Amino acid sequence: MDAQELFQSCRRGDLERVQYLSEHKEVDLNQRDRWDSTPLYYACLCGHQDVVLYLLKRGAVCDANTFDGERCVYGALTNQIRKLLLEHRMLTSVTIRREAYTEFLRRLLEDENHKDLTFYIHGQRLTAHRCILSSRSEFLARQLDTRWKDRKEVSLNKKEISFSAFKSLVEWLYTSQTKIDIRDIDEFARLIRYCQLPMLNEELDKAFKKADSYVKSKRGVQIQALYLESKHALWDLQQDLGDLAQQALPIEFRDWHSSSELPYSSSSQHKFVDVVFQVDGFKFYCHKPILFARSEYFRALIEDYFCEGEEDEAYRIPVIKIHHVTPSVFGDVLLFVYTNSCKINVDNVSELLDVGDMFLLPGLKRECGNWMGGLVDQENVMDILRTARVYRLPRLEDTCTEYIAKNIEQFLDDKALLEMVEQDAKEVKDRQETDSIQVVDDIRSHIRSSVRTMSDMEDAETRLNYLDIILSNLGLDAQIYLDTIPSNLHVDA
């Protein structure tokens, strides 16, 4: 429902609703509908420049030289939107990247810290991490175990291998996405076959056919680059990094994660590890670059480690002790750090929230919040709402206030809700007519946004009256907070 509403809002030009769906509902802005179109495409097609600008700033993908970019440029209703798209750059420092895991993967690629292998291709230099390359390609793993073993530098001077094609390949290995200049397609394809990457070969073939078909249908359109990206490719990357995560777990703990779908190969234990975390006597053999790029907390731990600290006898690498977390939950955290996913249940969700907060992993907290959002009912909604506020989880908070708004008549005498309304009212200093109570505003906003038809408006007015009764029972002047359905609101007949 949220996805469908995003597409509709982009077509209507409802910027406020798009902002709400993006920032509170955390709806994916780069998803596609059954016509292979994105929200950005519809905003361009319908001429809503303010929505287009917002989507671009929030991370909507649109490189003007790619298939999706050309489609948006070609379909743009106005020259102003067309100019905006052409001037936009797919990855800039000012672009807000909503997906923390995608940003982590790009930091891992771009950050020079802890890179332990340097390639020279026709005189040009490119650095990488052995642990990433070996986990992503069996061919590269064999090379690192044989010809490139213990080598810090590798020269690739075959004329069939260009620097730009190799750089694009490494970018895909790290992030599951890359942009290929049309002029490099043949060299890139040969490199894919050489490295034995059938999935990437399939992605390239699909993207090329898609772009070729579009160019033939639109006279004068030229595509200068292909942008490779898919959910399946990202999933495959997560599985490969999940293999590294499984290797990090102590043998005693691996059965605890046996329900995970991530593969584990017992023949490749503790490969390219360079740091050990010790939790209640259990050792987790990890990879600095991944932890370094994923969390400021782990970055600080690694940077602040002193040489006189403990060292693992087997691998001669530093041992860092972690406190205030159980070993099993630390294992869950590592799975999330590497793969952006972990098993959440009633037994670990509370500790995962605490640890996610402590380890500066907002994505882990959001995962916990999303899981808790599926449990909301009348008995626990206020407890979950308080939890959402404590851990700053706007989507979970929104889920709770939406539930209350839909069932407001059942909360007229709810002690927990009344206490929250009173507390929020006390936090309003020097109250004026324009001041508002947070939880009341949130509930009222959901009631208003539910209006689609005339019968909806009648139901909304009834629920707003219930909300006013709650304010009156608390001795708060309902007129100060009155916010009726606007007379100019569009409803379907």
Image (cartoon, helix red, strand yellow):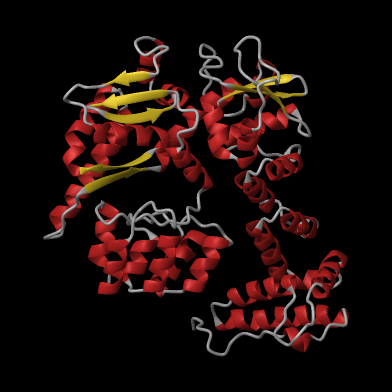
Residue at 24% x, 53% y is: 65
Q: Is residue 100 above or below residue 448?
A: above
Q: Is residue 318 above or below residue 389?
A: above
> Which quadrant of the structure image shows residue 313?
top right
Please indicate whether residue 58 sits to the left or right of residue 308 in the image.
left
Residue at 31% x, 67% y is: 84
Q: Residue 166's spot in the image, x, y percent?
A: 28, 31
Q: Is residue 68 above or below residue 325?
A: below
Q: Residue 248's spot in the image, x, y percent?
A: 60, 22
Please indicate whether residue 128 sits to the left or right of residue 281 in the image.
left
Please indicate whether residue 371 sits to the left or right of residue 108 in the image.
right
Q: Nearer the viewer, residue 36 or 16?
A: 16
Residue at 62% x, 31% y is: 302
Q: Is residue 424 visible?
A: yes
Q: Residue 328's spot in the image, x, y percent?
A: 72, 28
> Which quadrant of the structure image shows residue 187?
top left
Q: Residue 441's spot in the image, x, y percent?
A: 69, 75
Residue at 35% x, 15% y is: 143
> Which quadrant of the structure image shows residue 160?
top left
